[in-house]
Amino acid sequence: FSSVELTQHFLQRIDELDSQYNSFITVTPEQALAEAKAADDIRAAGNAGKMAGIPIAHKDIFCTNGVLTTCGSKMLSNFVAPYDATVISNFKKAGMVSLGKTNMDEFAMGSSNETSFFGPSKNPWDLNAVPGGSSGGSAAAVAARLAPAATGTDTGGSIRQPAAFCGITGLKPTYGRVSRWGMIAYASSLDQGGPMARTAEDCALLMNEMAGFDPKDSTSLKKAVPDYTADLDKPLNGLRIGLPKEYFGEGLSAEMGDTIMTAIKEFEKLGATVQEISLPNTMLAIPAYYVIAPAEASSNLSRYDGVRFGHRCDDPVNLEDLYKRSRGEGFGKEVQRRILVGTYALSEGYYDAYYRKAQRIRRLIQQDFLNAFEEVDLIMGPTAPTAAFDLGSNTDDPVQMYMEDIYTLAVNLAGLPGISVPAGLINNRPVGLQILAGHFQESQLLNAAHQFQ
Ligand code: GLN
């Protein structure tokens, strides 16, 4: 069948079903059909690549030329990007078809999609459950088969955790592997874009288009991009898997532990060996992350001043009033909380006590992983401490919400790649197995995940 037919199929599903899931902020049917038609023409001429004509949805954090790019915020609810992010232009070059932009926590700050100005997205497995966040709309859209694939971004778990909650596969690449250019900044030293899809094989195909050096991103790495599909079938014989004892202790329910251990037994059947390891600074990841990420956010979000772009208050009486009311009206509660925390942590007199200390902890956490990867090839554990929680159940308690990120944050602090793969169900809500590897070992992650699937 043609790309136009395929695209029509997904557009129709979005039209019929997305009122339940709220997984899209913007759908672009005319543009999608035009791109599909172009892909069909290229295919007919015999020069189409593997991914030409395949539809994809993009997290609304990626700038898309001529298309609304809101980042889940009232602040950018009127912002039409004047250019494409590198990730978007890479997919366009591959001939892929953009269906539209997906829902997300405001400025990617959240773990449940509930901070979105456009209302929460819902988990297709159970409409009372959150889809996870911040890339919740992308996860819900793929899980509900409204799109075969989607992009996400992961600053502290935002690809892996929603993938786990929605029963799909999500890969957070090594920091610097995928260009951040045109991806709206949250915490620049942690942000990384990546693929979300049904399987590891699909993620590998997407990574082939997404990854690579970009001179427009100063933290992008000049390193050749392997064919991520090449190693998918490699046997796992002799692979050494480490289970961090800190990931299986207090805070993890027996049910969750059992589901993850059952998954890990499958790897033993495939020839891998399993040993206990220790990541002693695991508990420090939450406090370190929740200083560093807000500090960077407070700086990145200072550009939203009501002058250059985004929301502007009505009838400002002077410049001070313009700033205050534009920002006060444009940013939601969680974003304001992070800006306050970050500004405080960076201010003179507190810098050493908070920001510098957090940076030192970051180094210790990174060293924990480097030590562990001397002993093992991969690290495995749960992606999140629970399956998807009920909508509204964590919204009154920000610290409780931050605790949900316990297994995902350290990976970003260390710049490592990580993948979440579906590992079972608890009360009909999906659970994810998280697999971690050394820097630039995405192929190994995809290989292990693919063998498991
Ligand atoms: N939940 C974390 C936060 O709120 C991570 C979000 C993300 O990865 N973008 O900051």
Image (spheres, rainbow, N blue to C red):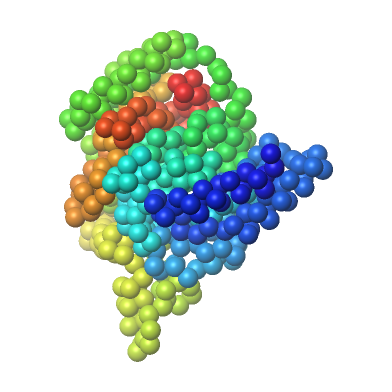
Quarter of image, res 304: bottom left
Horizontal relation, residue 44 to residue 55: left or right: right
Q: What residue lies at 63% left-to-right and 58% top-to-bottom?
A: 31
Quarter of image, res 415: top left
Residue 221 appears in the rendering: no
Horizontal and vertical percent for residue 365?
32, 36
Horizontal and vertical percent for residue 95?
68, 46
Where 52 sits versus 301, above or below?
above
Which quadrant, please, contains the N terminus?
Answer: top right
Residue 385 appears in the rendering: yes
Q: What residue lies at 39% left-to-right and 67% top-to-bottom?
A: 74
Can you name the residue that lies furthest to the right here?
45
Horizontal and vertical percent for residue 309?
48, 73
Can you name the residue that lies furthest to the bottom here?
317
Q: Nearer the viewer, residue 65 or 165?
A: 165
Q: What residue lies at 48% left-to-right and 10% top-to-bottom?
A: 237
Horizontal relation, residue 140 to residue 47: left or right: left
Q: What residue lies at 32% left-to-right and 57% top-to-bottom?
A: 115
Where 44 sits versus 12, above or below?
above
